[in-house]
Amino acid sequence: CRRADGTSVAAWMVEHGQALDWPRYSHGAYAEQHAKAEAAKVGLWAGTFQAPWEWRAGHADGAKPAASKPLGIISRRLFTQSGYSCEPRRTCKQIGSCEEANWYLQNCSWGGKLDRDKDGIPCESLC
């Protein structure tokens, strides 16, 4: 959704701390805005909170308590330090290393597509 001036409403909301980026679905599209809001401690980041997907994971019928790593979200520090993003890579030919393939497998919603035989090893030509 865009404003009349072309500004993305979602990007603006994330940048101003009025919404959270969930890379599992955005594929990292708002990571920069998210990092900016978190660093500036604006909006949601002015205090402490539990991400909605963490809360839901801990309160679903029969669900285990939320693990130390939130379900489906990328650690912002990991995202920044690794240099990778969840921008979709359609094939293993677009990936440069086994380390990178494993990062996508573990952190991106589409990462499972890199493990075609479901043995836990992505891009077998690289790993």
Image (spheres, rainbow, N blue to C red):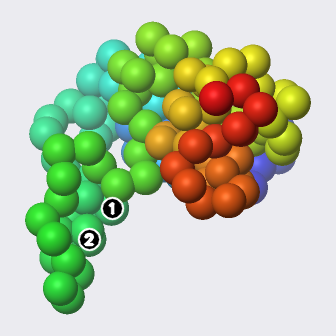
Give the crowd class for mark 1: few <14, some 14-19, many >=20 residues within 10 Å. Answer: some
Viewer-proximal residue among 91 and 44: 91
* Element on which disc 2 rests: helix
Instruction: Give above or below for 51 relative to 27.
Output: below
Instruction: Give above or below for 28 relative to 61.
Output: above
Q: Which mark is residue 45?
A: none
Viewer-proximal residue among 12 and 21: 21
Tag 1–tag 2 contact (CB < 8 Å):
yes
Disc 1 residue type (three-letter): Trp
Rendered location of residue 62, percent (x, y): 18, 85
Viewer-proximal residue among 25 and 96: 96
* Residue 94 in view, yes or no: yes
The C terminus sits in image quarter: top right
Rendered location of residue 73, percent (x, y): 41, 45
Q: Which mark is residue 56?
A: 2
Q: Name the residue carrying label 1.
A: 53
Where, by quadrant of the figure, is residue 65 drawn?
bottom left
Residue at the location (18% across, 59% down)?
Answer: 66
Disc 2 residue type (three-letter): Arg
Instruction: Give above or below for 66 relative to 98.
Output: below
Where, by quadrant of the figure, is residue 89 drawn?
top right
Rendered location of residue 38, percent (x, y): 34, 25
* Element on which disc 1 rests: helix
Lateral position of residue 47 relative to residue 9, left or right: left
Looking at the image, the residue that sits furthest to the bottom is 61
